Image: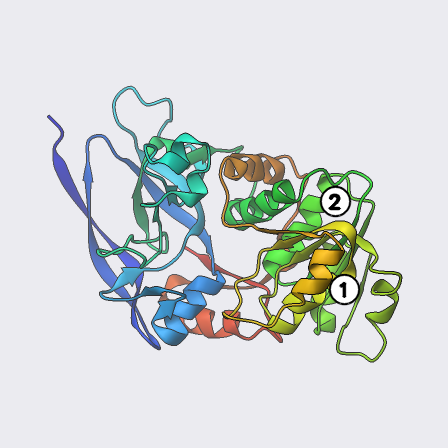
Amino acid sequence: MSHIHTLKCKACFAHGEKDVRVEPRTLEYSDDDILVKVEYGGICGSDIHYYQHGRAGMSVLKQPMVLGHEFAGVITKVPPGSSLAVGQKVAVNPSQPCDHCEYCLAGKQNLCVTMRFMGSAQFNPHVDGGFSEYVRVTERQCVPYNAKVPASVMAFSEPLAVAIHAVNTAGPLVGKRILVIGAGPIGCLIIAAARAAGATEILASDISDRCLDLARAMGATGGFNPARPGASAPYQEDRGYFDVVFEASGNPQAIAATVAFARPAGTVVQVGMGPSPIEYPISAMLVKEIRLVGSFRFVNEFTIAARWLEDGRIDPRPLISAEFAPDHIEQALVTAADKTASAKVMIAF
C-alpha cells in the first residue's frame, strides 16, 4: 500500500493578472513518485502570458498555480525498483498524456485530449509547474543526462523539443533552403535543429537586429529585417525562394507573408501562436500547391532534444539573456517580456 508523504518547499505561484508570489507549498507525494530538486528553469511565453493577463490562450487561471514547464534538476527520491537513482541529473518532460485515447494510441501524444501539461491552467484543478524547489514527477518524465553538462543547458530540452518537432513536421530538410520567421528562442532553436537536420541555407526574418544576431549565433547562414524597404523582395521573386518556411512569430502579417516566401510545392510550418481569425492569401497558397501544416508541442522529440543538448550538438547558451533567483520571479517575468532586451530568462534555484 502506497503512503502519502508531505514536503514543505517554496514555489513561484501565479495568482492572476500581474500577481505572482513566492510562497511556501506543501508538496504531497506517494511511495511511487519521484522527487526532483529543481536546479534551473526557463521562462516561456506562456509563463509571461499568465503573469500579464492571468491566462495563456484559452487557459485561464482559476486558482494559484506554480509556473514553469522548462526545467532540469536532480533526483532526491525514487520508488523501490526504479531504474533511476538518487543523485541523478534529469531533464523533466512536462507532458503527461493519458496513453489510452485514440491520439495517444496512434503515437500522437501531443494531441492527447486530456494532456496534463505542467504549468498549464487548461484543466481545473490546474497542473502545477516546475518553478518550485521540489517537484513530484513520474519515471517516464525523467531523462537522465551526464552531470558534467550544466543544468541551465538541459533546461532547454522542452523548447528544443518543440523546435525538433517542427523540423520533423516539415519532412526531410537535407539540402533544403529554409526560412524561419521570428528569431525568438523557439525560432532560434528551429534554426539550430534545421542545421542539425541538414538544411543547406537557413535564413532568419525578424524586425529586431538583436534577434537576427542571435539567429546567426545559433546557426543561421543569413537574415533580413522585413521592416526595411526591399529587404524581403529578393526572396519573394520568381514565385518564392524557400523550400520550407517556419513561422515562429505568430504575427498576422508574417503568417500571411509565408505564402510569398515559399516556392511552389513548398511547405509552410506554423509554429507561432497568432490571433484568430487572420487574413490569409488562400488563392496564392492553393495555386502554388503549398503544404500548410501546424506544429504543436512534441512527442518523442523531448528525449532527442535532451541528447542533442547533452552531446553538444546544439548549444543554447547564446540565448540566455539573464538569470534570477526564484524570489525575484516578478522581475524575471518583466525582463523576459521585454523582447527588445531578452531572449531566454532563466530561474536559478
Above or below, 76 relative to 262: above
Q: Badge 2 is on which residue?
A: 195
Please identify, in this view, whether the residue under mark 2 or under mark 1 is nearer the observer: 1
Amino acid at circle 2: Arg
Instruction: Please give left or right for residue 156 compared with residue 33 in the image.
Output: right
Q: Which mark is residue 260?
A: 1
Q: Quadrant of the C terminus?
A: bottom left
Q: Quadrant of the N terminus?
A: top left
**Residue drawn at point x = 41 percent, y = 66 percent:** 57
> In the image, is 192 to the left or to the right of 50?
right
Report how far apart the C-alphas of labels 2 and 1 lie in the structure.
23 Å
- Residue drawn at x 34%, y 33% is 99
Question: Please, is residue 46 above or below residue 289 in the view?
Answer: below
Disc 1 residue type (three-letter):
Ala
Which residue shows up at 69% across the image and 48% down it? 192
Please tell me which of labels 2 and 1 falls first in the chain. Answer: 2
* Mark 2 surroundings within 10 Å by alpha-carbon count, few (fewer than 14), some (14 through 19), many (20 or more): many
